[in-house]
Image: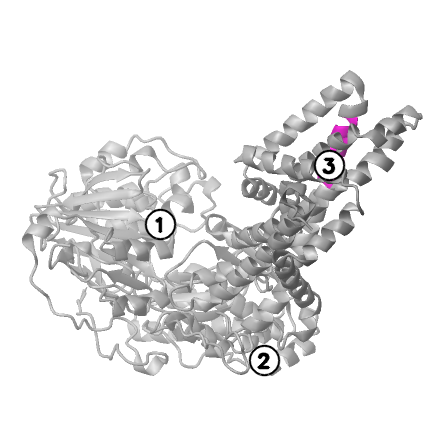
Amino acid sequence: MTTAKIEKLDRLIEATATARDAKTGSLWRQSIRRMRHSPMALTGAIIVGLFVLVAVVGPWVAPYDPTAQTWGREVFLNQNIFPGPRPENWFGLDHLGRDMFSRMIVGARQTLLVGVVATFIGFIAGAFIGGVAAAAGTFGGRWGERVEAVIMRAVDVALAIPMLLLALSVAALLGPSLRTVMIAVGVAQIPIFARLLRGSMLAQAHSDYVLAAIAIGVPKGRIVVSHILPNSLGPVIVQATLVLATAIIEAAALSYLGLGNPDPGSAEWGTMLADAQRFLSGAPQLAIYPAVGIIVTALGFTLLGEAMRESLDPRLRRQE
Amino acid sequence: MALGLFTACGSDGDAGGDADTAEDFDFSCPERTDGEPAADTAANESQPFVFGTPGDPTSLDPILASDGETFRVNRQVFDTLLDADCTDTVPGLAESYEQNEEGTEWTFHLREGVTFHDGEVLDGAAVCKNFERWANFKGGYQSPNFTYYYSSVFGGFAENDPAMGIETESIYKGCTADGLDATISLSKYTSSFPGAFTLESLSIISPASIDAVADAAIPTADSPLPEYTQTVGTLAGTGPYKLENWDHSSQEVVLTRNDDYFGEPAKVKTVIFKTISDETARRQALEAGDIHGYDLAAPADAQALIEAGYQVPVRGVFNLLYLAYTQSHSPLDDHAVREALSYAIDRERIVNSVLPAGGMVATQFIPPSLEGYSEDVATYDYDAEKAKQMLADAGAEDLTITFCYPTDVTRPYMPAPKDIFDMISSDLQNAGVTVEAKPITWVDYIPTTRSGECPLYLLGWTGDFADPYNFLGTWFATESTEWGFNNPEVFDSIAAANTEPDEAKRVELWKAANEAVMEELPGLPISSSPPSIAFAPNVYPPDVSPLTREDFSQVYFTTAS
């Protein structure tokens, strides 16, 4: 499992490092051109675009207050009576008589927020750790190599722990809240970003322009910050898109396990799924809406991320 | 001397149909409509009857227990002087009893030829030995953690340990035995008698067992229960089943039939109580045939189970769910605020939507089947506008309040705590109150709410016997941290009713007490509802009890499964 993860990361690094040697046009311009013709990328982009749109404007376009138990008297949990889809409630009512459609729309924002913030936390912290390790390993001499070894072994250990388990431990430490979910999911992504950036930077460290910079006496710190780092961020950004999908799923899982927003009224897809579980036999639609929401969104980000990864990979490049 | 009369379980209503209102439901015991199909003798001999319970028992010694899961097991193994049928008091180990005019001397005429599982014979001396043992508990045994029921019925012990905080004097004066007669003397009457003699906690155990545990070290108030309460073999009762094994790791208690039982012997040879704490897992275990019945079915499952051919007999209504207003938290000490909150809550919706069919909105802190249920209590019918207005008048428009509810638990009076919490908190928010949710795990819930930490919290009570004091006295006998109010008028009205020996006068005094409590409004009674119990199609179920006091010796298989 872990080896597979590491191998995948290494290939991504290799891919971008090799891609840089391409002679014509910039790497990114080429990639974007390739992606425009990829149905996978288009599908992913459309889904992500729609999702982001809903997440941003959702609270203003939701027909009803997602937390108001407006139709509470029409729902009978004890008899499995949940008024289904109808003109005023397109997705029907949940177990407390709240409008499911409004809850889905408003829930999208929380889902996006958690995904983006968690990925950002993982990105920044992971990039920092990976960057320090790579810089130390390349220019730090024998002590630097030791520092790098210690950091990277720690990262490997963290990578070996199943992500959800890591997130759960963090969440259990911090107590249930939306912030906890963001931090927990973010922390779980740190080792991925750390390993990726370090690998990518090491690949760049031996390229000609770095040699040239060393030769003309540019200070080592500046080489790392202004030359190696910017050129190594490509694969990390691609990975961030992929991680967003995982982050969304994991955030939903943590909310499902009751570690999310402690306000039980809040609209959040994972919490909605957990609530619906009890009524699965009587009202499966309550579980289907948030489940489909989570799946489609995660799928959108995955498609987009994979398409970006492939477009950067010269071995998968089609003849143009 | 007045002769105590036993009456059969009254059953005068129609259990079927729409049972949402007080008028058309028989609260105590709906009549059984199923016949008694023939038993499959081979199956009953060879096949264990497995019953899924929501929780583990805590103690095999009944006097050291106060929870329903423990009593479910104890009830099959031990007997009490008097028994309960429905909520009525009927003969138990005593065939009959007499009381004096003042209600301070109770003479029990015991059945002849009753033997304990260890061969000891039941006589007056054995009964007195039990009472003497209880009255002379020392040290930590006097803590409510150990002997909650004994001290709440008798007030205290022969020598109250000052460290245990019991200040009232014991009303138990002594016990004299004469052949098969045992006479219990009390220093004053309370309305808990004779009902208290049906309490599972006051089960009679073998004199040899008492000798065997007499040397057990005296615990402190917080120490765990003594070792002998956790393994079978030490204690012997008289009941239809004997304790065979208690496997703590697989959470199973195994009982085997007592062939020398004085009553109708049990038909099924082996009964196993298996703990399955998750409500859905219990249903799935029943559907898979792993268990043959389970308690506390989710209301929504009940209908589906009936349609699939399972049996879900209707229990009587004998519990109460309430929302407490802990008055040590300002501004809940303001009567107007408590009143406003009460008007804000739509209890009818909770009853109609969440509780099992047969539930009803409660107007006072006792269920309607009890004497002393008053039609004239102050009621606080749902009126959101009025609530808002009253809060504004009381200067509490921007009220923010912490509201506790228990997680991972279903109780007989409360099938879905979080749903009920969600509904109430939405109602309160509609009245302009900001609610801060505080979910607490069940293990910590009772201690937390008792300490007065929660301004608002949900809790309830299932009655032990048909007496209002078992409800009202549990909560409002004296000042307590769990309610945080001191209103001598309420305390005195309950004490007056509790100590009145004349029945007609007592009923009036209980009505007055209920009215005084609802005037004070220490909390909002929400509902009384029948907890659901389910059985496999090939099982003849026991008579279901509003006290959740089922006698599993009545169970048998009609066909092998």
Give the crowd class for mark 3: few <14, some 14-19, many >=20 residues within 10 Å: many
Marks 2 and 1, how far apart in space?
39 Å
- Callout 1: residue from which chain? B
Where's residue B488, x and y in %? 52, 65
- The residue labelled by disc 2 is B384
Task: Indicate whether residue A134 is drawn in magenta.
Answer: yes
Residue in view at x 63 percent, y 45 percent: A316
Which quarter of the rendering shows the C terminus of chain B? bottom left
Determine whether, in the image, residue A15 is placed left or right of residue B462.
right
Which quarter of the rendering shows the N terminus of chain B? bottom left
Numbered disc in front, either 3 or 1: 3
Question: Magenta part of the protein: which range?
Answer: A125-136
Tell me the kind of residue under disc 3. Ala
- The residue labelled by disc 1 is B55
SS at mark 1? Answer: loop
SS at mark 3? Answer: helix
SS at mark 2? Answer: helix
- Callout 3: residue from which chain? A
Is the residue under label 2 in contact with that under label 3 (CB below 8 Å)?
A: no
| Above or below, B479 relative to B17 | above
Where's residue A300, x and y in %? 61, 58
Where's residue B92, x and y in %? 17, 56
Where's residue B222, x and y in %? 45, 38
Using the image as rendered, state which of residue A110 and residue B494 is in the foreground. Answer: A110
Give the crowd class for mark 1: few <14, some 14-19, many >=20 residues within 10 Å: some
Marks 3 and 2, how far apart in space?
67 Å
Label annotation for residue A17: 3
Marks 3 and 1, how far apart in space?
60 Å
Q: Which image quadrant for residue A59?
A: bottom right
Q: Which image quadrant for residue B371?
A: bottom left
